[in-house]
Amino acid sequence: MPLESPRQGLKEKNLENKMFNKKIKNKIGFGIILLLTIVVSIIFVSLSSGDFKVVSIMGEQKSIIEEITVSKIENTNLQARPVNLKIENTNLQARPVNLIENFVTLNVLDQSYQIEIKKGDSVYDAMQTLNNLIDSFSFEAKEYPGLGIFINEINGIKGKSGAYWIYYVNEEEAFVGVSQYILKDGDSILWKQE
């Protein structure tokens, strides 16, 4: 019986170890694939099995919607099916969402304008901005020393005899001139002839 050289024995041992490691790697790879398949199956089954409670949070407010139906496509090879979503009812009230940040609304007669404002803008500044942006809005004003700016005409309509243009902020009559009232986000300005 021929004697093995130590090198040949080592080579055979290394070859056996490599084959053993390859078998383990294959088994681990198969195990990972199997585990992922199980997890995806569980997620798919749980998503397709029933009703969902969804609460949509906008800042500190929660939307209040009773029930909506949407179509959901799980896979491009599968057909869409309706899914009923029930949204949890809360005691909080929904607040209207404005697409423009820092805005005011200016109402004159039957016209309503929404104007974006900068910090520190007055009613007069907002009216000037609107006058520069929109052809359908115009006004004339006169400055009186010690009193401020007085609005004489809006959209071609002058103050009638004994009546003047008076403005209201958030449905309350303003007690300062148009150049002195500093606007806040969401203010509503209403002009009336009185």
Image (cartoon, rainbow, N blue to C red):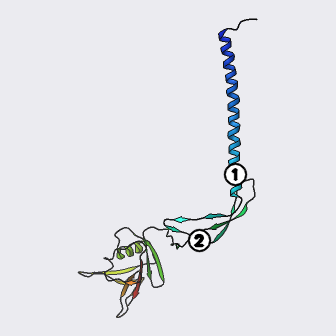
Residue 68 lies in quadrant: bottom right
Residue 172 in picture, x, y percent from top left: 39, 84
SS category of the residue bearing label 1 = helix
Between residue 89 and residue 75, name the one nearer to us.
89
Left or right? Give the position of 53 relative to 114.
right
**Residue at 35% over, 89% down:** 164
Q: Amino acid at mark 2?
A: Asn
**Disc 2 marks which residue?**
89
Residue 165 in picture, x, y percent from top left: 37, 86
Q: Is the residue 142 above or below the residue 8 in the image?
A: below
User: Alpha-carbon neighbours of circle 1 within 10 Å: few (<14), some, or many (≥20)?
Assistant: few
Q: Amino acid at mark 1?
A: Ile
**Disc 1 marks which residue?**
42
Residue 94 in picture, x, y percent from top left: 53, 72
Q: Quadrant of the C terminus?
A: bottom left
**Residue at 67% over, 8% down:** 5
Between residue 73 and residue 116, name the one nearer to us.
73
Left or right? Give the position of 83 relative to 148.
right
Total marks in image = 2
Mark number displayed over residue 154: none
**Residue at 48% over, 81% down:** 111
**Residue at 53% over, 65% down:** 57
Residue 148 in picture, x, y percent from top left: 28, 80
Chain-order first, disc 1 or disc 2: 1
Q: Is the residue 152 above or below the residue 9 in the image?
A: below
- How far apart are the alpha carbons under marks 1 and 2? 28 Å
